[in-house]
Image: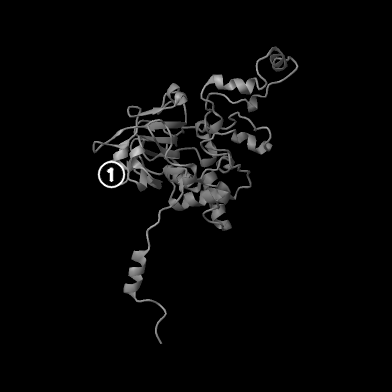
Amino acid sequence: MKSFFPTTSVLILVLFMIPLKFQSQALLPVEVLGPHGTTDSRQFNLPDASEAGILYLQVNNFTFDGKVEVRLNAETNWTPLSNSNIYSDAQGNAFGKIGGGYSTLKVFANFIIPTNRRIRDALVDGVNTIYFRFNGINDAKTIGFRILEFNFLKSDGTPLLSSSQFIHQDPSTWGPVYSDQASIDAGEDLWFNKVNIDNPLNPVPIKAKCASCHSERGEDLKYYNYSNLSIIERSKFHGLTQLEGEQIASYIRSLNTPSPFEARPWNPPYQPGPGLDSKPVTDWSAGAGLEAVLDSDSEMLPYMFPDGTSDAALEGIFDLKGTMNIREMPVAIQFPDWNDWLPEIHLWI
């Protein structure tokens, strides 16, 4: 009786004939979190590479020049992004660009790749790969950055990648690394009692435990949907092992704390914006999101005066017995994100 299974040579031939497929949708955000040199990448389909003139990124935690490095396809050299080879939007420029007052920055780059080629020269028609690397060799505060959006723009600013080419992480699908109670209990004990180090560049013990800087039981990490990766890598930053970080992440995931979809590490708490009051009270701390940040003060006018500026309309707005809902009034300033509220300095033991 002949075997049902093909011979090895036939199997190899069949596998060779199957075309390699790339992920049709790039998953966002790209969390480049870990020690110095950590990398991550995404693939995308570009029908006409010759039209690509500008690389657009929205980056969370871009705190100093050169922190974010990019590479395209087969290029062997990395390009560090700095204030010398990028520009931002009006808001980002006004608040200092990279290393300035904003935790999340829109970056536009039309740089020369180290091999003396422009961006379009490093791209191909069809499937491309963009790589991101964390340059944290002297960084004693952070564990990397997040790419919230990326795209390639024509010279007139038109994006070449459609929204259908991207898919966003859904925190409601996340679970603990370990679901057994022993691991969760171990994570809780580590959260309250583990002796941490200051940082990898200054590995001295500190008095602060995890619970000293975060909300007591870690509800902030659950509420603002910090990923397991971010919790694990931050634990390792403070001297814990991979296993201990995974146990803490499992403990955080097990908390009975609401975690609205809009509550993310990059969305500023209590950022005002339309529609906030219609949401459950538990969602208010999440704010209205980065998309509620206006580009200029003048853009507030239609929200302040929705019925125009006639005498009758103004009389209704400036009624001494009336109120203006500042929770739903968008403003042209990005509030600090949750990381900005956490202490950076710890006492040594």
Question: Residue at left 67%, top 37%?
Answer: 279
- Colouring convention used in this rendered image of the protein: one colour
Query: What kind of element bears circle 1?
Result: loop
Q: Nearer the viewer, residue 343 or 48?
A: 48
Is any part of residue 322 visible from this angle? Answer: yes
Amino acid bearing label 1: Glu
Count of numbered badges drawn on the protein: 1
Q: Quadrant of residue 32?
A: top left
The residue sitting at 68% across, 32% down in the picture is 277
Residue placed farthest to the left in the image? 115
User: Residue 67 at what x, y percent from top left?
Assistant: 36, 35
At horizontal 55% and vertical 43% (from top left) the residue drawn is 225
Left or right: 254 in relation to 141: right
Residue 327 drawn above or below residue 76? above
Any part of residue 135 in sight? no
Q: 335 or 200: which is nearer to us?
A: 335
In the picture, which quadrant includes the N terminus? bottom left
Q: Position of residue 322 (x, y in %)?
A: 73, 19
Q: Position of residue 331 (x, y in %)?
A: 57, 24
The residue positioned farthest toward the bottom in the image shown: 1
Residue 310 sits above or below residue 242 on the image: above
Q: Quadrant of residue 259?
A: top right
Q: Which residue is mark 1?
A: 75
Label 1 CA crowd tier, 10 Å (few <14, some 14–19, many 20+): some
What residue is rendered at 37% in x and 31% in y?
155
Q: Is residue 346 left or right of residue 77?
A: right
Position of residue 195 measured from the top left corner of the image (x, y, whole percent): 47, 43
**Left or right of 129, for residue 267:** right
Question: Residue pushed farthest top?
Answer: 311
| Vertical relation: 320 (above or below) 99 | above
Q: Quadrant of the C terminus?
A: top left
